[in-house]
Amino acid sequence: MQELLGRIARLDPSASLGLRVIACFDELVVGNVNTRALLSAAASLAGCVAGFHQDQPVRSLRVNPRGEVLRDTTAPVPATATTADGLSVWLERVGDALPNDAIIVERLALAVRIRHGRSRTGSDHRRDLGRLVDGDTPVDERLAAAGALGLGASRLYRLVTAPLFAVWERHPRGPEDVVPTVHGPIHAVIVPAEPGDETLKASPVGVGVATTPQDLHHSFRTALVALRLCDPPRVPTVYADEYGGLIGLLADAPAASAQPDADRLAELEVHGWGVATIEAVIHSQSVRQAARLAGVHHSTMQTRIETISALLGFDPFDGFGKPRLGAAYLVWRLRRSRVLDLPSPTTETRK
């Protein structure tokens, strides 16, 4: 499938995204995710509300692109809905339909029929993953969910996170599910934390820190931060371990928390050399080393650092200046991250 995606993308980007829609729903069907998760996926892929209605027993459900259930379920099933076997699904698109709307609805309808035409067995514990990565779930319930998933209480695991449109060259083995988040539905997979595991090859993907099952909710949060730091094709995969405890602070910081250093750092975007210089300074121990990394004369780098110091109000090579600069840089990257935006069907998708 992924080889075919690459070939098609070079010929017809819109068709490539269509095949990714098929691959996405194939994984969801295999994972036996519930109706809400299927609607979340469709809404995320389409960028608009997805709806569902069943005749017996009567039930309606509408989900927005962020994976949130809309409480207004009184609206009638639209005439444009796809209906089969007493089940209806639709997209609430304002304006003209986009090229892949039809295939999203088609695959959603198929997935919903499969979901409602097959009963879950008592040994299917995929729903436990959502409870396991929810920090608000009591510890004893998280441990029970870990046991149901076959995880060893003292072993270390990591959460792997990816958007539903991610391209998987090699899929890891482990419990997986689609989990609602503030960033929309996210594909989550639990993998062992043993080093040297080369089974993970995907883009974009974030890998969380290693924890015991009791703390996998923390690994999940760090994996989400790592995912948002991805920048395909230059940076297709980010490991939370690369940033140590700093990524944990970012994962636990409230979304609306004040970050004055990051606010000021954003002003450097007016300089063409701003981002490259910040990266060089973060990865060096001296002005001369930063100059070599950036490919400029050390006097030029010194002038740039003086500009940065004047803007930020501190010297990045003095005291806590380096960690302050690093934290501000990561917050700035998270603010401008677009990795979770659905690739446009009218532009060439990433391979």
Image: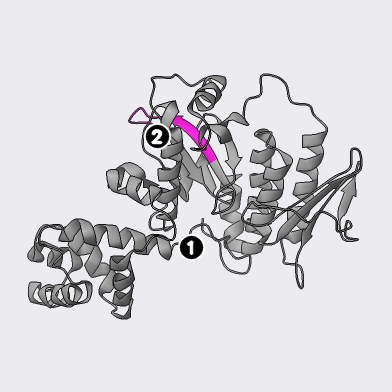
Q: Amino acid at mark 1?
A: Arg
* Residue 116: quadrant of the picture: top right
Residue 199 visible, this angle = no
Q: Amino acid at mark 2?
A: Glu
Q: Residues within 10 Å of mark 2 (few under 14, many from 20)?
A: few
Residue indicated by mark 1? 338
Determine whether, in the image, residue 210 is placed left or right of residue 170.
left
Residue at position x 44%, y 27% in the image: 213
Residue 297's x, y, as percent? Answer: 10, 74
Residue 107 visible, this angle = yes
Residue at position x 42%, y 54% in the image: 254
Q: Which residues are magenta?
A: 188-197
The colour scheme used here is one colour
Residue 192's x, y, as percent? Answer: 42, 28
Q: Residues within 10 Å of mark 1 (few under 14, many from 20)?
A: some
Residue indicated by mark 2? 198
Residue placed most toward the observer, 266 or 164:
266
Tell me if residue 195 is in the magenta stretch: yes
Residue at position x 90%, y 45% in the image: 84
Question: Which of pointers 1 and 2 indicates the residue nearer the eye?
Answer: 1
Which badge, 1 or 2, is on the more N-terminal residue? Answer: 2
Residue at position x 51%, y 46% in the image: 162
In the image, residue 201 above or below residue 64: above
Residue 145's x, y, as percent? Answer: 55, 25
Element marked by disc 1 = loop
Element marked by disc 2 = loop
In the image, residue 152 above or below residue 198: above
Determine whether, in the image, residue 324 is placed left or right of residue 16.
left
